[in-house]
Amino acid sequence: MASVGDVSSQSMHFAQPLALRSGAQLRDYTLVYETYGTLNAKRSNAVLVCHALNASHHVAGTYAGQDPGWWDNLVGPGKPLDTNRFFVIGVNNPGSCFGSTGPMQSNPATGKPYGADFPVVTVEDWVDAQARLLDALGIVQLAAVLGGSLGGMQALSWSLRYPTRLRHCIAVASAPNLSAQNIAFNEVARRAIVTDPEFHAGHFYDHAALPRRGLRVARMLGHITYLSDDAMEAKFGRELANELLAYSTQDVEFQIESYLRYQGDKFSEYFDANTYLLITRALDYFDPACEFGGDLTAAFAPAVCKFQIISFTTDWRFAPARSREIVKALVDHKRDVSYAEIDAPHGHDAFLLDDVRYHALLRAYFERMVGEGA
């Protein structure tokens, strides 16, 4: 199976303010996006791929032969989401640090980077921004919206906010809201960032500083939650970093410590601290049932599209039980929903990996869409 090859990003500016759920507005903003494949004459084969916390619009392909997209194993010619058949769109959400308007960009009101003044954004705000981009591209209805984790939450939100604008919703390793434990993990990560002396209340750009220490700890904590105990044990066990113990409270003693520090160091060099705060808050806030007294079935009443919900047995951050809540709410409304719970050892990260059963499932689902005329 081939890659889509080298790709380039596109951008679109929006002068009309985007009204946010917080009551604030985002003015003069830009969205960065990529597309793969060809939009057919009926404009009926478009698939929107929504990104998770630390990903972006770069879903597939490469930049000058390097830096493959974060879902390159899934999207491309002959792959489960086949770009010979579908026109795939990846959008970088507002508030991100990968090109779309976010904390690092200039605030038109001040001429300085937004920093901590960037308005709080929600999953619903992102979906509204994506809908505007599709309007500008002349796409009235999507064949599907696909996402994993936080991306899956966006796919679910699409089915509720714009129910007639998608024919299929595919939510992988997702949930109808975050558990208290998940909110707690996010809060610890945020505190690591905001208590870093280099954070400067979110205006560290003005001080030529970067809160690297906080970002490192936030990433290390997050990474632990993305892996299952079995995956961590199989990959690292109690292997030592060096031949002999140093009997030190500060040196690296075990391979797992070395791995986490490496992940933290790498993350702190490319991700923006204010973006991390914004995106984890968007995760916390997502709760479509909240407006219905906690009744998820009532929340899904507007949905009319077909659904494919997928979970992984060892994903303890977005456990299968959370996906089954979504399935039950849809079944209560007699919606067309398929559910797959895949026995995979990788934990939450399984949605990004090459699992034969997982990819075969998605391939079959997209092939059925083609049969329906996508």
Image (cartoon, rainbow, N blue to C red):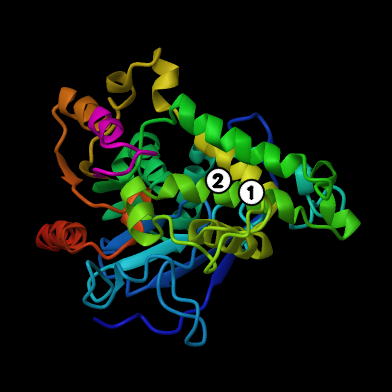
Magenta segment: 312-325
- Relative to 2, does residue 279 appear above or below in the rendering? above
Per the rendering, the mark at residue 53 is: none
Per the rendering, the mark at residue 221 is: 2
Image location (x, y in percent) of residue 266: 61, 65
Q: Residue at x 52, y 47 (%)?
A: 222
Judging depth in this view, the residue of 363 and 267 nearest the camera is 267
Residue 188 lies in quadrant: top right
Q: Residue at x 49, y 51 (%)?
A: 223
Image location (x, y in percent) of residue 57: 49, 63
Quadrant that contains the C terminus: bottom left
Image check: 330 left or right of 212? left
Label 1: how many Cα within 10 Å (few below 14, some 14–19, many 20+): many
On the question of residue 4 being in view, the answer is yes
- Relative to 131, does residue 122 appear above or below in the rendering? above
Q: Is residue 328 magenta?
A: no
Judging depth in this view, the residue of 91 and 173 nearest the camera is 173
Per the rendering, the mark at residue 217 is: 1
Image check: 280 left or right of 310? right
On the question of residue 20 being in view, the answer is no
Residue 12 lies in quadrant: bottom right
Residue 303 lies in quadrant: top left
